[in-house]
Amino acid sequence: MTDIPPFAIFFFGAIVALFLRGKLLSSWVIAVPVVSGLLLLSNSHDLTLQTSVAGLTLTLYKSDQLSLVFGYVFHIAAILGGIFSWRVDDSLHQSSALAYAGSALGAVFCGDLISLFLFWELMAFVSTYLVLGRGTDRAVRAGIRYLIIQIVSGLLLLAGSVLHYYQTGSLEFTHIGLSGFASALIFIAFGIKCAFPLLHNWLTDAYPESTPAGTVFLSAFTTKVAVYALARGFAGTESLIYIGTIMTCFPIFYAVIENDLRRVLAYSMINQIGFMVCGIGIGTELAVNGAVAHAFNDIIFKGLLMMSMGAVLYRTGKMNGSDLGGLYRSMPKTATLCIVGAASISAFPLFSGFVSKSMVMTAALEEGYVVIWIALLFASAGVFHHAGIKIPFFAFFAHDSGIRTKEAPTSMLIAMGIAAVLCIGIGSFPSLLYSILPYSTDYNPYDVTHVLAQIQLLVFSALAFVWLKLSGIYPPELRGLNIDAEWVYRRGLHSAYKALSALMHSVLNDIYALLIGSMKQIYHWIFQSSRVVSRLAKETTIDVMVLGVLMLFAGFLFLMFA
């Protein structure tokens, strides 16, 4: 019973979520990752599940220390996202979120390239609704574009996997290395999802247009699955060092001039992924540990920042820095929790970012990449400007926008509070994280030299921000759209994009209608008593969370013994 792969639990939960409403739905979305996480902790770590299809052996589940780190943090992210989205009474949205998390877990635990492709593409399809679900014209256009690019990534992965199989006779997903055309296709497929330079605009376009809760899930899974895939297949590939370094630097300039604060965080995400990619490229045990640890931490502190901005959007309906400011009066708790996230991403000592980012930078110095280290140092100062200072400053302080609203809902504050506690706990007790990394390490982030150097960097960076603001040099928050590498896309492919967008939108609507129509019969057959159960939950003292867990357990028994 305990050897059920996590993705199966999430997929089952996603199907059931389509037929739930209200508090029962919200409880279910939290119960699924909680139960799955507990089962993962009790699973045999040498468990392997395989099946044979057309003469090919597919490994649907295989765990080692690298996949377990991502498995643990993906469960944490799913729980935080579920709590944050407590008020989202949209069964399709919640089902998509669960299926998305399940697909990400399937990708990090599968052991062959074909299974990876299947989870890779499923992850793209089910996550698209988190963007489309916001319902605005910009969200629909961004969502369709997101889906198209994610599908292209999957097709490249499939083509590379097939060629790799013909060249090597193996589909095992292990170290591949950049050694030929097949590996290059796989490398580019991973690079698209990882938001490599010139391949990154799907992220900065789609994430800011998604629902407030959807962005929390999106920031956790897609890019981090790609980081995992690079760590699994291309660790030690030197080109990743330079790609990662560029990723850490160029988003700073766009984030500084960007008005939409969720888009600022999207650029910031590329910056942080750059540190991970650089560490994977260096390839030493310390560097890979640092990359994986930073991915773990980024999911939590970036999720915290996305949640704080999601709470602001939920309460005000605004996200531009030029329209916000002064919200600390109305939302002091959200402002405080946002500052914790800002301190974490800025790598303040005693916060989570400090104990992982320094591992990558130390590894770069140890391997003689002095110029790379200097670039990473610059990027560290830049992220403090655009995420550590800009996000909380323009949302909650700066000028007084005159907006007076309510504090964030309790469920959102709880999710942000848990994330904040994790940020401080990991930063204060890094051994908790270091103990689960792929390689054993005795690295000490609180070496006096590290601490003093980081404090100096942060102090001078803060002084620079103050000077730039007082002198009027700092770019003002202007309403507008910043165009970077996607200029050709927007100018040259606009007509083709509109036609394809309309077609894809129609296809998605047809698929959705078919899905709902076919599932209605299952609903009436299996869940016809759900209204009675819901009424019972309201009329008795049974907590809805316990009810959700009991229903999930009953579903497991049905799957196991039916």
Image (cartoon, helix red, strand yellow):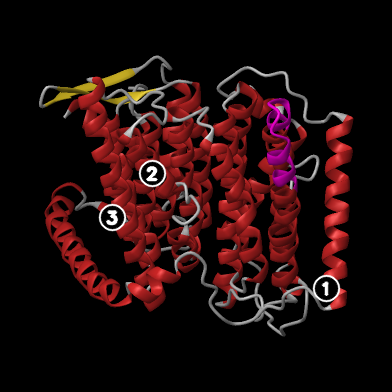
Name the mark nearer the viewer: 1 or 2. 2
* Image location (x, y in percent) of residue 358: 73, 36
Q: Quadrant of residue 252?
A: bottom right
Task: Give whichever of 447, 475 is nearer the camera.
Answer: 475
Q: Is residue 368 magenta?
A: yes
Q: Which mark is residue 18?
A: 3
The mark that comes first in sequence, 3 or 2, is 3
Which residue sits at x=63%, y=46%? 418
Q: Quadrant of the C terminus?
A: top left
Q: Residue 521, relative to residue 513: is it above or below?
A: above
The residue identified by callout 2 is 188
Type of amino acid under label 3 = Leu
Q: Could you say which disc has been placed on residue 190 in the image? A: none
Q: Which residue is mark 1?
A: 469
Q: Amino acid at mark 1?
A: Lys
Q: Please state which amino acid type lies under the numbered disc 2.
A: Ile
- Can you give x and y, in whole percent of width and height, for residue 500 in the image? 23, 70
Provide the residue span drawn in magenta: 362-377
Badge 1 element: helix
Q: Is residue 136 visible?
A: no
Viewer-side residue, 507 vs 385 = 385
